[in-house]
Amino acid sequence: MANVVQYKLVTQEWVVGDQQEHLDARDYISLKQPLVIHLVPQGPQNYTLALAPYNPADPEGEVKIYKFAIIGEPAKVPKALHDAYVRQTSQIEIASTLSGIK
């Protein structure tokens, strides 16, 4: 995963994906294997995050997200979210999550 970024869209969705290129001259960004971040309630003041395909019909595909649909700059992807994205979109297991390695 070369450039995992997250964007908030005007639809209020958070999307995380592997940004393929950064072309200022274009009116869109291209994300490979984009996932939508969902909040899942775990209690009255507790929640967890779930990742679902942005395009369920083609979860491994690439989508163009037009810049007018994005609110602000790309947000920094926290390590836990980055690792979850890598696990869900590849067969790679993050070494820090493996237990029992000595």
Image (cartoon, rainbow, N blue to C red):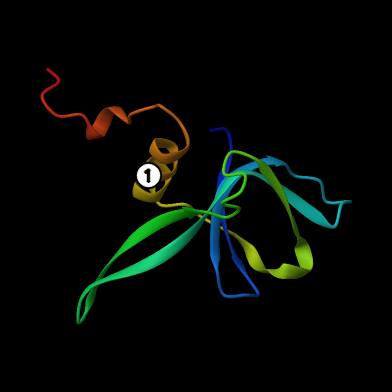
Vertical position of residue 58 compared to residue 101: above or below: below
Q: Residue 30 in the image: x percent, y percent?
A: 72, 46
> Image check: 42 left or right of 16?
left
Quadrant in the picture for the C terminus: top left
Q: Residue at x 77, y 63 (%)?
A: 67
For the point 37% across and 44% down, which residue is it?
Answer: 84
In the displayed orientation, state which residue is furthest to the bottom: 44
**Residue 28 position in % (x across, y down):** 79, 55
Foreground residue, 65 or 74? 65
Left-right relation of 4 to 48: right
**Total marks placed:** 1
Disc 1: CA contacts within 10 A as few (<14), some (14-19) or many (>=20):
some
The picture quadrant where one finds residue 86 is top left
Q: Residue at x 37, y 58 (%)?
A: 50
The residue indicated by pointer 1 is: 84
Q: What residue is at 89 percent from the left and 51 percent from the top?
A: 25
Q: Residue 60 or 19: which is nearer the viewer? A: 60
Q: Quadrant of residue 6?
A: bottom right
Name the residue type under label 1.
Ala
User: Mark 1: which secondary structure?
Assistant: helix
Image coordinates for residue 34, horizontal then vertical, percent: 58, 49
Query: Where is 53 relative to 68, above or below?
Result: above
Residue sitting at the far top: 102
Residue reaching furthest to the front: 57
In the shown orientation, is residue 19 left or right of residue 99? Answer: right
